[in-house]
Image (cartoon, rainbow, N blue to C red):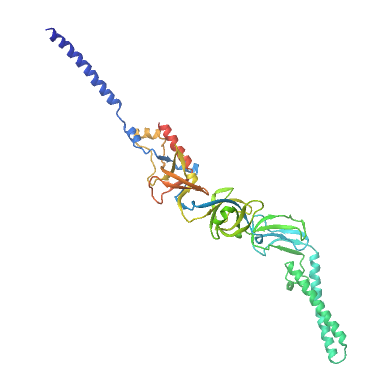
Amino acid sequence: MKKLVAAAIILPVVFFFSSCGSKESKETTATTTVTPAEEEHENENPDMAVLTEEQIKSIGIELGTIENKQLTAALKTNGVLKVPNQNKATVNSIYSGVIKSLLVQPGNFVRRGQTIATVANPEFIQVQSQYLNVNSKIVLAELEVKRQKELNAGNAGALKNLQSAESELRSLHNAKSTLAQQIQLMGINPARLGNGKLISVLPVASPISGVVSNVLVKMGGYVDVTTVVAEIVDNSQLHLDLFVYEKDLPKLKNNQTIHFTVTNNPGKEYDAQIYSLGSSFEGDSKAVSVHAKVKGDKTGLIDGMNVTAVISLANATVPAVPSDAIVTVDGKDYIFMLLDNEPVKPATDTAKHDAAEKHNEHEEGIQFERIPVAKGGSDIGFTEITLLKEIKKDAKIVTKGAFFVSAKMTNTEGHEH
């Protein structure tokens, strides 16, 4: 009887605890239910960054592709840009005078023979006047020689007078030739001179075609043969002087390709080709000059600029991107690829809208995917890469502004967490 009473008391207690346990389990299950927004968040790509067009424009992001560059088996050296002396000119006035006009200013392109200034001097008229007087005397001297020949033929004149007349005529012709050359040096055509057509203002012409680098005179200033009126440089024959150490000289030969950048614009690459190897050391150093002709576009290059050059020693090419296109996160290297899909649009339902707010995606954006890479050697602003994830051959990548895309991704992740 006592056993039955005890069993009757225990059964309700067990049922009570069992009921409580079942209720707590249901509550736990209810609290761990995943909402649609959270499920969508868990399925998002952690290597994805979304930027609006306004952000891309303000940051200045630029796109490009993975290029093939000659970065291996190369010799890195320094040098300077030079223009040969035959392609540089200082313009002087052959005759002294006062600057009447200046027709150019620094930066202007001029052609050979083009007038860049004019010089005025009344003394210019004297030479022209002497030339015209000699012409008149020659006419009279020729008549005198003709008359003496007629007299000498009729035995009415002396041979001495004929010889004297001929000598005078030769002297006048020599004087005319001398004066004509002087007038031509003034830039005047002697054949165009006549009475009342004398010129007192002379042109100063450019001896070469090129760009005016400096104008050294002013209006009304006095110049003579020693005064430099302007300086002109022809960059079409711009060449590169590199300084290579003795141990590296056997590696070089004519027609080798050189890639170089200037100090003030390291992002712009230029090409040159070796045409001459030096045969003596530069000063007290053990460096030898190597001369190369600059090829292609020379915009932005000026005589005297310092450059950093890479001389290609082999024709092997490797995939490479601008060094600024690579970002390092937690010891790993990445590039960012533009995705071809449609821009990310704002969520429509309430749950997705709340999730979008958490991701700062209130407006349409453009998607970029972070692609892992392995870095190789770096030269002339480019770095060799090996893709650790396959992408399309013509895929667009971020070549400028990758750091800001990475920072946007990092800030978004920090906000989500």
Q: Depth check: give the residue in front, 242 or 118.
A: 242
Could you tell me which residue is drawn at 78 percent across and 74 percent down?
Answer: 176
Q: Is residue 173 visible?
A: yes
- Horizontal side of residue 187 vs 398, given as left or right: right
Q: Residue furthest front?
A: 247
Q: Depth check: give the residue in front, 214 or 72.
A: 72
Query: Residue 219: x percent and y percent?
Result: 74, 55
Q: Residue furthest top?
A: 2
Q: Is residue 235 visible?
A: no
Compared with 281, 165 (above or below) is below
Query: Residue 226: x percent and y percent?
Result: 76, 59
- Quarter assignment of residue 231: bottom right
Q: Depth check: give the residue in front, 415 or 406.
A: 406
Image quarter in which the N terminus is found: top left
- Quarter assignment of residue 173: bottom right
Compared with 369, 286 (above or below) is below
